[in-house]
Image (cartoon, rainbow, N blue to C red):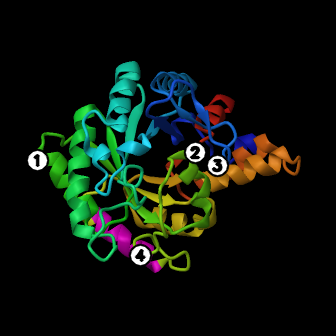
Amino acid sequence: MRRMVAEHRLHPADLILPAFVREGISEPVPISAMPGVVQHTRDTLRKAAVEAVEAGVAGIMLFGVPEDAKKDAAGTAGTDPDGILQVAIRDVRAEVGDDLVIMSDLCLDEYTDHGHCGVMDADGRVDNDATLERYAEMAQVQADAGVHVVGPSGMMDGQIGVIRDALDQTGHEDVSILAYTVKYSSAFYGPFREAVGSSLQGDRKTYQQDPANLRESLRELALDLEEGADMVMVKPALPYLDVLAKIADAVEVPVAAYQISGEYAMVEAAAEKGWIDRDKAIMETLTGIKRAGANMILTYWATEAARGL
């Protein structure tokens, strides 16, 4: 009876798998704060992509982890056609073709020696406009590598418009933009920074949003849509379900939510202690995100959850 009258249903096609690929390793590297998640080699990333397709997962979001020696102030490895993320995009595209929507993180933080999402000015602040020039280059090289969707996550003002222009001017009109429209300055990002080998110094409060604010999210939404976003995202997911619901009610484009590393880690840690039922908790959290209005959910449990649906 419950199954028959359920108002919201999860489907494998709702799910997107975030995946990390690290340069210069021969075996996957476990991420200590995210049990079951690894930094992939190029070969194991291909395997993970195939497994996602077989489970019915709709997409994969790729994050590159370069060698530390290749990090610099401008994040040069992020725009190198032979940089780890671009190589990984080509690998996955060659392995699964169009059977999986291949998405890429479009941000500089993994590639900068200071760990910020943009280039810095002489006073040590993120230079918004100079960063946009770098994002335009990143969009082009990721599209050239074969990505279907770019995911600008740096929260720079005007980033969607600049990236859309860069894609259109280089013959990549069909590459879509998943805008990180609502991205809060959150305490739940901690495990992710281990996953990408972050070199962050300080914090990102000058360009990520204040957790106390909701109307700010609606302003960001209006700007991203005006600039040409094809899809929009709320990140994190569970602490901001009210924001997700407001965004979903306000738009006619697809809405994504990112169940981030800290959310994953909390469930896994509590389950390891025997305090909660892991499998039920995973499905309950995903259902809650779907109920709040997400059409797509980025989750590290994507393949596992899809197999159980």
Q: Earlier in the sequence, mark 2 or mark 3?
A: 3
Amino acid, disc 1: Gln
* Residue 273 x %, y %: 86, 48
Q: Which residue is mark 3?
A: 286
Disc sitting over residue 299 in the figure: 2
- Is residue 258 highlighted in magenta? no
Badge 1, how many Cα within 10 Å: few under 14, some, many 20+? few
94 or 123: which is nearer to us? 123
Kindly report the distance in space between the C-alpha atoms of the residues bearing marks 4 and 2: 26 Å
**Disc 4 target residue:** 206
Q: Which amino acid does the dot numbered 4 rest on?
A: Thr
Q: Nearer the viewer, mark 4 or mark 3?
A: 4
* Label 1 vs 4, first from the N-terminus: 1
Label total for image: 4
Label 2, label 3: how many angstroms apart (C-alpha)? 8 Å
Spatial distance from mark 1 to mark 4, Cα to Cα? 30 Å
Q: Are marks 1 and 4 in contact (CB under 8 Å)?
A: no
Distance from label 2 to label 1 (Cα)?
33 Å
Q: Could you tell which of marks 4 and 2 lies nearer the N-terminus? A: 4
Q: Which class describes the residues within 10 Å of circle 3: few (<14), some (14-19), or many (20+)?
A: many
Nearer to me, 166 or 109: 109
Residue at 59% across, 38% down: 302
Q: Tell me the mark number nearer the camera, choosing from 1 and 3.
A: 1
Q: Tell me the residue at 53%/47% (across/down).
A: 297
* Residues in magenta, as a range: 215-225
Circle 2 or circle 3, nearest the eye = 2
- According to the picture, the residue beneath numbered tag 1 turns out to be 169
